[in-house]
């Protein structure tokens, strides 16, 4: 947002034409974007507070003051907070901040996603986290979600072996011990993610969240700008797969230029591919930009649409992508409706990718950002695993690839379950790639299949975890 060309142009005009100081100009320019977004309704309030956060940081930077936000105690620390603004999380020093614990947010909320992309263990939705006194020794397990105060020596010793450096590199392509391939790909949304995906040796990109270059804009970016943004990614992954997701606007990613009307339930409203019905030009321009960028580079570009619910939507998207000249076309499976019709959907496209963050929220009718409903959004919920199984079964019948790109792709034991279900690629925060690769390499496909069966047949997330753990230790 801070580098948005419209914002910079507006601030520059205020300096040139009205003689404002840079800090005043930045203050007013961001204030005007915040007013536009705020006018879109109270649900956009979170976005407005992000903008104010950016404004405060810009003004601090321009006036030579320390940025507001996370204090630096001068030594490594575990960060405890009620919640964090995305800018707080994105700006964390990964060498200092060892882990994050917040009182609010769900495991698939944006704070959790960004923390994971930085390779910082994060546990969200911990009541009274901020009441823990400064100086308390904490053990934070970002995989199990456990936060232990003053752990015993035994607990510390049991944890130490799983501590990994933040930027561990994937040494070989993802595969089980007996050579069954599972491509290990990265989720990216920012320039920093591109760098860490490369650093961590991702085989490619399984989810390029393009809406991040639309966010906070008062007007849609031009085709030229979009071409540049896509080329910046494609050029870094020459010869490798890059799965580009078209605009996933709406709900938690409001965009003023779509002219939103207030909706009582935005997560169940006009979001994802549904915005293409009222703004076909946006999708058309984006597909054209992806095509132009793909032609200029050598990455193997796949394109997919988010939030699909009907086969007609799939046909409409596939037609648009085909008209744009894009050769590999797919859709995301993020709703139970899409999972139930996976077979018909796969008949229309080349691949599907399962977005377990949203698939969980819609399967359990539980807001993914709600801390109090986090247990329903647990990726080990057997009902969710059965949804995934429905899709992988259809994919196996069609012989087409099926990926998983939700946050849960980064869980090492769940990765085995997914491989056993027949998932052909896992896309995740880059920092998790090496761990997942090790987890796969330690078992055969047969073990993965047995783990998948045991997890799907369980009656709760804890028994699913336990069943898989037991299978792996025998
Ligand atoms: C998902 O829903 O699982 C997903 C990958 O998309 P996002 O988190 O961007 O909604
Ligand atoms: Mg989603």
Image (spheres, grey):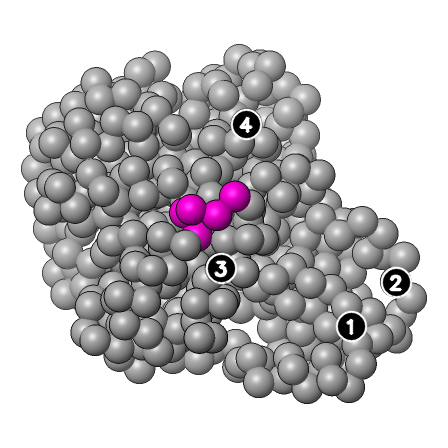
Viewer-proximal residue, 245 or 447? 447
Mark 2 — residue?
132
Q: Which residue is mark 3?
A: 467
- Lower position in the chain sequence, tag 3 or tag 1: 1
Q: Which residue is mark 4?
A: 365
Is residue 355 inside the magenta stretch? no
**Image-based side of 3 in relation to 346, left or right:** right
Q: Which mark is residue 138?
A: 1
The image shows residue 357 at horizontal and vertical percentages of 47, 42
Which residue: 23% across, 42% down? 393
| x 15%, y 56%: residue | 300
**What element does badge 2 sit on?**
loop
Q: Which circle, 3 or 1, is nearer the viewer?
A: 3
Distance (Cα) linking label 1 and label 4: 33 Å
Dot in front, 1 or 4 = 4
Q: Which residues are magenta?
A: 455-459
The answer to whether the residue labelled 4 contacts the one labelled 3, judged by CB atoms less than 8 Å apart, is no
Q: Are marks 2 and 1 in contact (CB under 8 Å)?
A: yes
Of 260 and 311, which appears nearest the observer?
Answer: 311
**In this rendering, does residue 25 appear at all?**
no
Of the image marks 1 and 4, the number of the one nearer the N terminus: 1
Apparent side of residue 121 relative to residue 313 in the rendered image (left or right): right
Residue 330 image position (x, y, % from top left): 20, 39
Of the two numbered discs 3 and 2 in the rendering, the one whose residue sits closer to the viewer: 3
Q: Are marks 3 and 1 in contact (CB under 8 Å)?
A: no
Placement of 175 over or under 467, stated as above or below: below
């Amino acid at each position: 947002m801070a580098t948005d060309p419209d914002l910079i142009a507006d601030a520059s005009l205020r300096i040139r034409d009205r003689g404002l100081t840079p800090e005043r100009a930045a203050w007013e320019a961001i204030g005007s974007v915040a007013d536009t977004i705020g006018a879109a309704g109270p649900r956009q309030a979170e976005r407005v507070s992000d903008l104010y956060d950016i404004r405060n940081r810009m003004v601090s930077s321009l006036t030579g003051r320390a940025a507001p936000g996370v204090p630096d105690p001068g030594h490594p620390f575990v960060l405890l907070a009620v919640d964090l603004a995305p800018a707080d999380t994105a700006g964390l020093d990964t060498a200092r901040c060892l882990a994050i614990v917040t009182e609010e947010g769900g495991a698939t909320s944006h704070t959790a996603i960004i923390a994971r992309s930085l390779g910082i263990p994060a546990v969200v939705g911990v009541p009274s986290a901020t009441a823990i006194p400064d100086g308390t020794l904490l053990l934070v397990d970002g995989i199990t979600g456990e936060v232990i105060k003053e752990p015993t020596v035994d607990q510390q010793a049991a944890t130490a072996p799983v501590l990994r450096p933040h930027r561990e590199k994937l040494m070989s392509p993802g595969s089980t011990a007996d050579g069954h391939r599972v491509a290990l790909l990265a989720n990216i949304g920012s320039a920093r993610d591109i760098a860490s995906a490369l650093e961590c040796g991702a085989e490619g990109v399984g989810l390029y969240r393009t809406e991040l270059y639309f966010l906070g804009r008062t007007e849609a970016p031009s085709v030229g700008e979009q071409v540049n943004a896509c080329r910046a990614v494609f050029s870094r992954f020459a010869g490798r797969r890059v799965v580009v997701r078209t605009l996933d606007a709406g709900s938690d990613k409001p965009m003023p230029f779509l002219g939103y009307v207030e909706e009582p339930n935005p997560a169940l409203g006009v979001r994802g591919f549904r915005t293409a019905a009222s703004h076909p030009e946006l999708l058309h321009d984006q597909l054209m930009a992806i095509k132009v960028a793909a032609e200029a580079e050598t990455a193997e570009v796949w394109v997919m649409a988010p939030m699909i619910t009907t086969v007609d939507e799939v046909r409409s998207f596939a037609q648009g992508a085909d008209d744009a000249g894009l050769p590999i076309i797919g859709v995301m499976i993020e709703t139970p409706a899409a999972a139930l019709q996976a077979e018909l959907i796969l008949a229309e496209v080349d691949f599907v990718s399962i977005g377990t963050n949203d698939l969980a929220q819609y399967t359990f009718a539980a807001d993914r950002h709600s801390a109090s409903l986090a247990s329903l959004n647990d990726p080990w919920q057997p009902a969710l695993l059965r949804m995934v199984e429905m899709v992988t079964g259809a994919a196996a019948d069609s012989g087409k690839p099926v990926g998983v790109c939700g946050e849960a792709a980064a869980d090492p034991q769940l990765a085995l379950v997914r491989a056993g279900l027949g998932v052909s690629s896992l896309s995740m925060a880059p920092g998790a790639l090496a761990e997942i690769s090790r987890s796969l390499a330690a078992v055969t496909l047969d073990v993965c299949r047995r783990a998948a069966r045991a997890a799907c047949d369980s009656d709760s997330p804890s028994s699913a975890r336990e069943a898989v753990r037991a299978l792996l230790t025998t």
